[in-house]
Amino acid sequence: MKRFLLLICMATTAASAAAPSDYAQVIPIETSGDSAAWQIDLDASVYAGSVDATLRDVAVFNAAGEAVAMKIQPVEYVDSTTEQRFDVAVLALPRDPGNAVANDLGLIVERDANGRLRRIETQTVTDPQPFPETREWLLDLGDSDRGIDRLELDWSEPDQGVVARFQLSGSKDLQGWQSLNADATVVDLQQDGARIERRSISLPATGLRYLRLRRLDAGVALVGLRVEASRTRRISGIAPLHWVEAETLDHLGELKSNPRMHLYTLPYAIPVSDVRIDLANDNGLAAIDVLSPLDTANAPTRWLPRAHLVAYRLVQNGERIDNDAITLSPGSRLRTLRLDSATALTTPPGLSVGYRPARLVFLAEGRGPFVLAVGSATARHVGTPIDAALASLRMRYGQDWQPSPAQLGVARASAGEQALLAPTPARDWKRWLLWLVLIAAAAVVGGIALSLLRNQSEGGAEDRQQPPEK
């Protein structure tokens, strides 16, 4: 009997193993190329479809319908750099004649309406012919506030055999100049199939509009000089916020909104980290507490304070000034929020919430295509030691290695709403069996008692019918 019950339990467990058909919907995962692991940033469709507070009702399956190893983690940006490049206006400065003196030299600078250089010309009294070889250039970065930290040089002639030294200085008004690089070398050499090329000049990050590039050596002239400026920026930090507007509620269960307490709902449960509150009236101010439900019931009775701020909306000289967004204390996914105001607010404030979507990382076990199954009242993914596998991949391919990015396709229904319904509680067969045993035992005991009573009754009757001895 025990063996039979054990087999039934094992069969029930095997039959209840999670599969894509156990979830409300599946979303195709679009991958390109080949990778041992993939990563996906979860979007609104995932949060809208998941009913578990910690996204445990989300799983990845391969083409054979087998669950693959995965984990859900916050989005972390690896430090990286990006380069922004743009062309620079280059104007050649004619070289001073050798026999001219300082008092004989004049410089004419012509700008357009925006201050950009259009023409530079030198004039001398003793010799009106400028020296034909250009050794100095003026660079106009325009009115861009991007700032630069490197110049990339290019020229039409010569094709090779260039070793040139430059001095670089900068100015904001063409009057005062400051040194940015006192001696920079540019090289373009080729010999026996080997080539050494370095055409960049580094400088401290600067936002000065004008740069002066001066040739220091007497080498071959650079004809048709062109300059490109660039700025290298370092990118690091956390994922950007996604903002969702909350909707006001008149009541939540037995709790009703009033001028000092306002209730809000979100279209789906999300991991809210920031809130933005907009008062309805100009030149208004209110001290506000932000609360979230302590439980996930439809009509929560306990609320947890998450933040306090002074909200305001000021208007001065036609300019509107609002309070900044505020960060909440850490917590789980939220569907409802509550604002308590120290002063009465007849019109509910506007409320927007910000959240950072989580990232799902999974191993490419089995054959694709892979699908993401979302939404189940019973199915829960099992934690797997995926970190050890990812660490091995980084040891092999370098610490900067990351799982290849994948994209989510269009969701389609799987089990639908049926998967979100709580199952009917299973009968407790142990309790029923115990009751049956107790009833059977009671019946046996009762039968024995009745038998004893019957035997005693029959024995007494025989004694009364037997005649007395003489």
Image: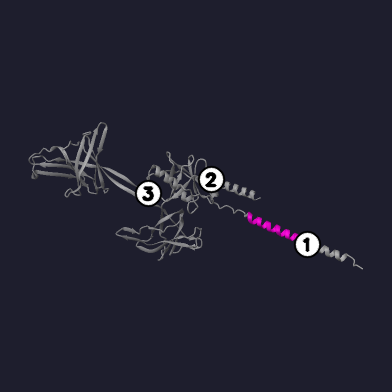
Check disc 2 and report its element: helix, strand or loop. loop
Q: Quadrant of residue 121?
A: top left
Q: Which residues are magenta?
A: 429-454
Decide if residue 160 is on the left or right side of residue 245. Answer: left
Q: Outermost residue, top direction? A: 192
Which of label 1 and label 3 is nearer to you?
Answer: 1
* Among the two numbered marks 3 and 2 on one chain, the one whose residue lies closer to the N terminus: 2
Category of crowding for the residue at label 3, using alpha-carbon neighbours closer than 10 angstroms: few (below 14), some (14–19), many (at least 20)? few
Which of label 1 and label 2 is nearer to you?
Answer: 1
What type of secondary structure mainly makes up the magenta span?
A: helix
Residue 249: x percent and y percent? Answer: 46, 59
Decide if residue 67 is on the left or right side of residue 158. Answer: right
Q: Could you tell me if the residues under marks 1 and 2 are in contact, i.e. CB atoms within 8 Å?
A: no
Question: In the image shown, does 126 or 73 lie closer to the viewer?
Answer: 73
Residue 36: x percent and y percent? Answer: 44, 41
Q: Which residue is mark 2?
A: 19
Category of crowding for the residue at label 1, using alpha-carbon neighbours closer than 10 angstroms: few (below 14), some (14–19), many (at least 20)? few
Category of crowding for the residue at label 2, using alpha-carbon neighbours closer than 10 angstroms: few (below 14), some (14–19), many (at least 20)? some
- What colouring method underlies this structural image? one colour
Q: Is residue 440 magenta?
A: yes
Question: In the image shown, does 190 or 220 lie closer to the viewer?
Answer: 190
Relative vertical location of residue 49 with respect to residue 137 in this rendering, above or below: below
User: The disc labelled 2 sits on which kind of residue?
Assistant: Ala
From mark 1 to mark 2, how far is it between C-alphas?
61 Å
Q: Which residue is mark 3?
A: 77
Residue 63: x percent and y percent? Answer: 50, 40
Q: Outermost residue, front direction? A: 470
The label number, if any, that marks residue 452 in the structure image:
1
Count of marks, rendered view: 3
Check disc 3 and report its element: helix, strand or loop. strand
Q: Quadrant of the C terminus?
A: bottom right
